[in-house]
Amino acid sequence: MPLKKQNKVNYLARIIAAMKNWIKLKKIADAGLPSLDEMFARDTHRAERMRYQACGIYADFSKQRISPDVTQALLGLVQEKKISEKRASLFAGEPINFTENRAVLHPALRGSSKDKTINKLVSDMQMRTRNFAESIMKQGKYTSVVHIGIGGSDLGPRLLADGFAACGKPELALRFANNVDAASINDALLDLDPATTLVVIVSKTFSTQETRMNGEAARDWLGQYANANMIAITANRDGAKNFGVSSSQIFDFWDWVGGRFSLWSAVGLSLQLTYGPDIFDALLSGAASMDAHFQNTSLENNLPIMLALTDIWNTNFLNYKSRAVVPYARRLRKLPNFLQQLEMESNGKGVMRNGQPAPDTCPIVWGDEGTNAQHAFFQQLHQGTSSTPIDFIAVLTDHENRPDHHLALLSNCFAQSEALMHGKSEADVRADLLNENMSAGIIDKLAPHKTFPGNRPSTTILLERLDAQTLGALIALYEHKVFVQSVIWDINAFDQWGVELGKEMAGTILSELQGKTNNPHDTSTSALIALARNHKAS
Ligand code: F6P
């Protein structure tokens, strides 16, 4: 074995040996588990025992391959990792993002901090954004808002824009531009009137290429209205001023708010402008109720902790390599994208806090809205050679006033998790085919193709309703889940150095595509650059 790999193996072996419960879990997994059907047969109270409830959210973990001894060992593991102390450090604003020497205080944005100075900063800013949103609505001058930003400055506001539509109606049209592909800003500005459009540029750093270029395009498009109709939300006030945004039109947030945790800050202003500030307050209060649940509820009844532990079990012990998120709610269709950044940018790390190699960390998170997904990738989920745990998410209230659609939607959601768990045995398939009067030859041929292995795990998360309050709680639930996992893996969930290298290299290549420089590359990259340059020239 190469030395580097051997070192990693030795190191992990030492770390893991220090964790009694990790070893216990490994032994349970290695010994093999009863099937999900057997687990249900052995314990008639399983569904009830493994259902959790908090802040308008139910989570049913009973279709996960988790036996009672697994739950006990997982709870032991999270205690061994001193979750209570780590959680207290998060809420106390200690600089737990140690590679950037920053506190991680997004909970303060929803009133969950005890730091008076921070609370004052937050409430002053909330007052400013509320007053600004109210004055814009009162003026009646604007018809549309164009929100420019990318990553954490885009995904959260987009998720909210869809989610809020379940219970409200936007006063102004809201469009988004994120990608550096000009189609993004072109589509966002199409057919709008610069005189009645408010452009909101959101960038924590105010140096992000995509946002700056889209901002420049919008500023040019606004022309004489640029001064009045352009606002910025940023932690880099000088950057925004130099860009041409007047000081009174800049709304600050702070370096202790990570981009992917920033939707609670002035980053959410576009939603206040379009849906009004009250709905935004409801979002914050829903998140605060999940903060309180996370801090004050015993480990075994704690929703974010159980969600995190389930993913740890699946990733580190059952070796599932990805997790699908399938909201059976069109208005949550952006949730898979949002969670991709939240989970993969936070926990997609290869080293622990001490710089040593980490165990397996964040699985790939992916997904799409149900029922659409059933007609796309569910074939693989049911019968493919690899199995993927799924988070099914649905809403109990019918917000669309179409009960027939709503019941059909829920029935599909529940049926998928049931089908994945039970599967269909070859014997049952054969019996069905016989009933259809198929010949023995045809039955032999078809039976393997119509068999479902089953025993495929999922969690079902049900929201009582899709209002701002519950949406806030749902997002905070996943934020805390991510944090708990980072504690168990002993990684820093709050930096993102992995995004830097490609950005730097794109800068070098851009100057080559512009014909300004020539740099050495591997032969593949050189050939791609040459193709693009020649194409441009032709
Ligand atoms: O490239 C990744 C990233 O830094 C994210 O972490 C962040 O949410 C996004 O870019 C946008 O950054 P900014 O808000 O500074 O423009």
Image: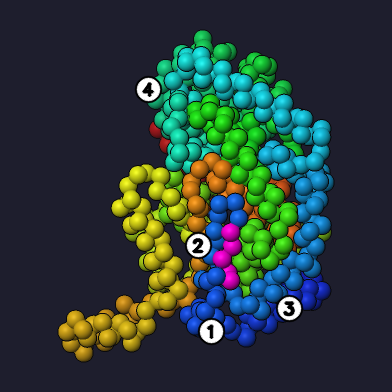
Q: Which residue is mark 2?
A: 460
Q: Which residue is mark 3?
A: 23
Residue at the (52%, 58%) spot, across then down: 461
Q: Amino acid at mark 1?
A: Arg
Q: Which residue is mark 1?
A: 42
Residue 428 position within the rendered picture, expressed as x and y whole percent measured from the top left = 32, 84
Q: Residues within 10 Å of mark 3 (few under 14, many from 20)?
A: some
The Cα atoms of the two marked residues, 3 and 4, are separated by: 61 Å
User: Mark 2 or mark 1: which comes first in sequence?
Assistant: 1
User: Mark 1 or mark 3: which comes first in sequence?
Assistant: 3
The Cα atoms of the two marked residues, 2 and 1, are separated by: 21 Å
Residue at the (71%, 58%) spot, across then down: 297
Label 2 secondary element: strand
Label 1 secondary element: helix
Q: Residues within 10 Å of mark 4 (few under 14, many from 20)?
A: few
The Cα atoms of the two marked residues, 1 and 3, are separated by: 25 Å
Q: Which residue is mark 4?
A: 191
Residue 394 position within the rendered picture, expressed as x and y whole percent measured from the top left = 46, 55
Q: Is the CB of mark 1 within 8 Å of ligand 1?
A: no
Along the viewing direction, whichever of 326 and 450 lies nearer the viewer: 326
State whether residue 332 appears in this view. Answer: yes
State whether residue 215 appears in this view. Answer: no
Along the viewing direction, whichever of 533 and 350 lies nearer the viewer: 350
Q: Amino acid at mark 2?
A: Thr
Between tags 3 and 2, which lies in front?
2
**CB under 8 Å between callouts 3 and 2?**
no
Direction from residue 100 to residue 66 in the image, left or right: left
Give the farthest residue toward the top.
224
